[in-house]
Image: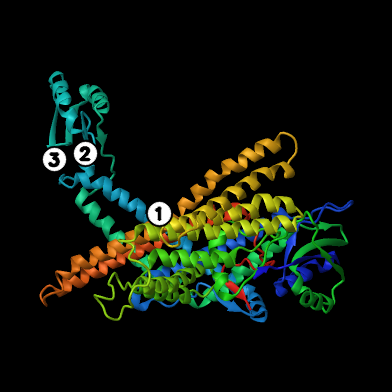
């Protein structure tokens, strides 16, 4: 359970074999490319135009895939086919599908035609809907719109005038005796008849008042026009349904389209790799990282490739930080999700995942601490994780929840709690071996603080070991190990204060005091000049940070206690309903909703706060992070997982 040792591959090859070399490296899935340092008389041959063309092809494939899947989503639930989001292929299977480029291109062309028709329908439908919306206010007008064309001597207008402008318009017409109007609908639709001698002034006034003239060149009225438009809308709806069905007919081509999409994506990766190479017209140089344990496999692959290449394996330079590969068992590997949410491990430090797996699980289990809750978390976590085909972050998170559920069951048994019921209420629940949190607040609060101190001691031990590896032995003693003894003294003092041990207060204070003094004085030996004084005072001032971090672990007790109290309240509320058959069902509903809420909020709060303790109180003393996880060249695909 550690970070895997890495090496470098340096390869020289003929430019004519460049694509074959990249394909061979892709098939091994053992390396990730790195930037080659500048070499005299070489250059970077990245082809921006070729990359853009590939991106356009990939975008078309992506559009075709999403369009087909969207058409299948419109089917009723019982008729929906199972769509493979991703799938496994061997390199041979992958290559066979890629060879069908002409067939796949034909499929894309057909889909493009359907999409263009679909877009035309959407545009026409939008125009029709806008047309209907503008005609709707005139449904109360029985005349056709052509009836409102001007005559030789009279200007005739139809339109809408805001209701708040009607008073002003009426007053204006007092000076226009040759103009009259009628209203329709809600009173805002005006039919205005004006003699040509007054029409200019009337039109000007109407424009000032916000009059909206009906400019429809129709031989029908609004009602008949809307009927015609609705008929066309129904026709478009049928055409769209037909297009949807035509798109669904391509469902059997989805696998080929997705494979081709990932092939194009791989071609883009190869094209982008040119940014990392150094090349001449005849040759190129590439460098890559690989796990030291993979060297033999890669050597065998390259030596049997019949390519014009020369290569060598090199050790990693001291100042070089390669990508990180962690090697953990199946359980600890799931907790890499928690660590990587903060930052991936740096190649030159400890892999913290084994410690995270232990402390996270214990703290999470303590927060939830109920047999029933734990069983639900195990079942839910495993169910959701096993549904995921790929080893995604979500799958790892669900496994973390399941492992946390196991520790929830353990602590639930120690507390004697099953959905908030104790041994007295439910005989199958084991008797409590840990004191009741409601009546033993101090004892359990101190236990949480001491558990936090244990984690902090581990973090300082890891810090000390790292400093020793860096040959900073005095720093390891005075900034790490002596403060471990200080924390031991604090832990002993708290244990006596909580009534769990006796007679150690004096020893605890001596250990803590001497350790703090040694830590402060030790700064004189590890620093120079004025830093000796400032760092010594800083070390003593840092004691405040220790106590602040220790108090942070009190949140474990607070979360556990709140969950226990909520569970008890839910049971009390439901108990009054469970006494008779008539009210039994409401009682069960109260239990289901109440405990469901408590599990959800407890798990969410537990995860967030326990993760915070790992990131701030634990990682802050030894963990650098800022690493980059190893991703094999060409395997960052969207749909295909190569076996």
Residue 249 makes an appearance in the image = no
State the SS at label 2. helix
Q: Is residue 41 visible?
A: yes
| Of marks 2 and 1, the one in the foreground | 1
Q: Position of residue 8 (x, y in %)?
A: 79, 64
Tell me where residue 204 sits by quadrant.
top left
Please give the residue where the numbered disc 1 appears in the rendered image: 123
Q: Considering only vertical position in the picture, is 518 above or below 457? A: above
Q: Residues within 10 Å of mark 3 (few under 14, many from 20)?
A: few
Please rate how many residues cluster around mark 1, counting C-alpha atoms within 10 Å: few if below 14, some from 14 to 19, many from 20: few
Q: Quadrant of the N terminus?
A: bottom right
Kindly indicate the quadrant of the structure image that contains residue 315. bottom right
Q: Secondary structure at mark 3?
A: loop
In the rendered image, which residue does mark 2 sit on? 148
On the image, the x and y values in percent for residue 210 come to 26, 30
Q: Is residue 500 left or right of residue 233?
A: right
Mark 2: few, some, or many residues within 10 Å (few <14, many ≥20)? Answer: some
- Picture mark count: 3
> Where residue 252 sits in the image (x, y, percent)?
50, 78
Circle 3 is placed at which residue position? 186
Identify the residue at horizontal 60%, vertical 55% (top origin).
Answer: 485
Query: Of tags 2 and 3, which is closer to the observer?
Result: 3
Farthest residue to the top: give it: 175
């Amino acid at each position: 359970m550690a970070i895997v040792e890495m090496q470098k591959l340096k390869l020289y090859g003929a430019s004519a074999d460049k694509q074959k070399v990249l394909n061979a490296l892709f098939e091994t899935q053992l390396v990730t490319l790195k930037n080659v340092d500048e070499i005299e008389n070489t250059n970077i041959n990245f082809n921006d135009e070729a990359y853009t063309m590939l991106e356009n092809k990939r975008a078309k494939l992506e559009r075709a895939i999403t369009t087909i899947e969207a058409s299948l989503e419109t089917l009723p639930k019982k008729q929906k086919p199972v769509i493979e989001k991703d799938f496994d292929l061997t390199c041979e299977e992958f290559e066979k599908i890629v060879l069908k480029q002409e067939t796949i291109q034909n499929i894309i062309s057909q889909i493009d035609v359907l999409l263009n028709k679909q877009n035309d329908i959407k545009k026409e439908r939008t125009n029709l809907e806008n047309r209907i919306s503008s005609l709707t206010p005139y449904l109360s007008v029985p005349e056709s719109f052509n009836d409102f064309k001007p005559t030789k001597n009279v200007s005739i207008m139809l339109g809408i005038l805001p209701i708040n402008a009607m008073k002003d318009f009426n007053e204006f017409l007092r000076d226009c005796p040759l103009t009259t109007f009628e209203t329709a609908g809600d009173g805002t639709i005006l039919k205005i008849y004006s003699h040509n001698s007054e029409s200019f002034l009337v039109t000007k006034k109407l424009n000032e008042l916000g009059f909206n003239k009906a400019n429809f060149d129709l031989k029908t009225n609004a009602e008949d026009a809307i009927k015609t438009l609705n008929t066309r809308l129904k026709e478009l709806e049928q055409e769209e349904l037909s297009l949807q069905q035509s798109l669904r007919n391509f469902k059997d081509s989805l696998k080929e389209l997705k494979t081709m999409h990932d092939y194009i994506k791989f071609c883009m990766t190869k094209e982008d790799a040119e940014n990392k190479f150094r090349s001449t017209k005849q040759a190129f140089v590439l460098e890559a990282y690989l796990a030291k344990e993979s060297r033999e496999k890669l050597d065998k692959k390259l030596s049997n490739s019949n390519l014009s290449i020369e290569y060598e394996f090199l050790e990693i330079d001291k100042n070089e930080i390669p990508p990180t590969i962690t090697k953990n068992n199946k359980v600890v590997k799931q907790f890499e999700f928690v660590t990587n949410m903060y930052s991936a491990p740096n190649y030159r430090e400890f892999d913290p995942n084994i410690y995270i797996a232990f402390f996270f699980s214990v703290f999470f289990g303590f927060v939830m601490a109920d047999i029933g809750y734990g069983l639900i978390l195990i079942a839910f976590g495993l169910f959701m994780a096993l549904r995921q085909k790929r080893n995604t972050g979500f799958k790892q998170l669900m496994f973390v929840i399941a492992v946390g559920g196991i520790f929830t069951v353990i602590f639930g048994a120690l507390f004697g709690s099953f959905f908030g019921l104790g041994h007295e209420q439910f005989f199958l629940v084991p008797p409590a071996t840990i004191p009741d949190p409601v009546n033993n607040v101090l004892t359990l609060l101190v236990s949480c603080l001491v558990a936090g101190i244990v984690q902090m001691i581990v973090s300082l031990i890891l810090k000390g070991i790292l400093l020793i590896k860096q040959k900073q032995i005095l720093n390891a003693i005075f900034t790490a190990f002596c403060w471990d003894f200080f924390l031991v003294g604090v832990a002993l003092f708290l244990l006596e204060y909580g009534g769990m041990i006796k007679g150690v207060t004096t020893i605890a204070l001596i250990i803590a005091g001497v350790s703090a003094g040694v830590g402060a004085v030790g700064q004189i030996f590890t620093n120079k000049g004025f830093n000796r004084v400032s760092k010594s005072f800083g070390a003593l001032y840092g004691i405040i940070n220790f106590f602040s971090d220790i108090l942070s672990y009190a949140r474990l007790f607070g979360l556990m206690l709140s969950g226990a109290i909520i569970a008890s309240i839910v049971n009390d509320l439901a108990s009054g309903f469970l006494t008779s058959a008539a009210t039994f069902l409401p009682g069960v509903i109260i239990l289901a909703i109440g405990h469901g809420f408590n599990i959800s909020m407890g798990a969410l709060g537990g995860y967030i706060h326990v993760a915070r303790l790992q990131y701030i109180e634990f990682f802050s003393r030894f963990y650098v992070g800022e690493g980059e996880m190893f991703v094999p060249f060409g395997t960052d695909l969207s749909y295909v997982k190569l076996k």
